[in-house]
Amino acid sequence: MMNILEEIIQFKYQEVAERKRITPGKTLEQAIHFNRPVVSMKECILQPDKTGIIAEIKRKSPSKGIINGSISVEDIARGYTQAGVSGLSVLTDLKYFGGTNEDLMAARASGDCPILRKDFVVDEYQILEAKAIGADVILLIAAALKPNLLKRLAEFAHALKLEVLLEIHNEREWEDNAGARIDMLGVNNRDLKTFITDTAVSIRLAEKIPATMVKVSESGIENPETIIELRKHGYKGFLMGQSFMQNHSPEKACQEFVNRLRKMESEV
């Protein structure tokens, strides 16, 4: 029996084949955003005046179902940016997460904050799409890709001037892909087979990752104390979605979180 990640990846290959048929890659290259200068999320994460938070916009997930079904992507993106986040993460998978490419384009229209296209990339075509809709960063999931394919996709992304966030769940996935050209390394604290989330995963893997790598902790970050603790282990980026999106006003929840974080950091 397939786990949810295997199911999603199988569907992605079918989806990409259909999208290629409808909109050829050459058409994507004519899109208005295709030649837009990319904004570096890596640099924004490292800026001392920013929070390191990558705030996510998603309507639902396979594990939680509907999280927030009625949202204005542009309003949330603008509010997140005003709160001082280092980047935005926008889900563009429709079937499993309720997102669309139009969501990312709406976030792009809100300003110049760097945007991660959060999707399950299996083909170069999706990277062309990411560029065409205004993304600055793509996600490559080690658990979903063989190392040779992951390396090839990373090179293709860089050829388009896009940054790459590599997501791992364990030490083996890092070892298998350490030679890939990436900009940031994300440690997902959520087990994609059991959906159990534990930020101790990030702490455990921190010592296995070179200190020069920009490390991002993903999932399960619910309070400022967790960020302060993760910083001690070398993490600079913090991908947060559900804790904001489950609120009626995600952007206000984000601002309140940032205010608490900055207050606590000033007291340390």
Image (spheres, helix red, strand yellow):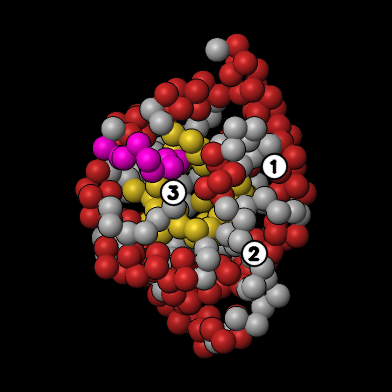
Q: Earlier in the sequence, mark 3 or mark 2?
A: 2
Q: Earlier in the sequence, mark 1 or mark 3?
A: 1
Q: Earlier in the sequence, mark 1 or mark 2?
A: 2
Write down the residue under mark 2: 37
The mark closer to the camera, 1 or 2, is 2
The mark closer to the camera, 3 or 2, is 2
Residue at (34, 70) in percent of width and height? 152
Magenta span: helix, strand or loop, mainly? loop
Secondary element at image label 1: helix
Q: Is residue 181 left or right of residue 172?
A: right
Q: Nearer the viewer, residue 192 or 107?
A: 107
Residue interval drawn in magenta: 208-216
Write down the residue under mark 3: 184
Q: Position of residue 180 (x, y in %)?
A: 32, 59
Could you classify mark 2 by the number of other residues whose Cα lies within 10 Å: few (under 14), some (14-19), or many (20 or more)?
few
Q: CA distance from mark 1 to mark 2?
A: 21 Å
Could you classify mark 3 by the number of other residues whose Cα lies within 10 Å: few (under 14), some (14-19), or many (20 or more)?
many
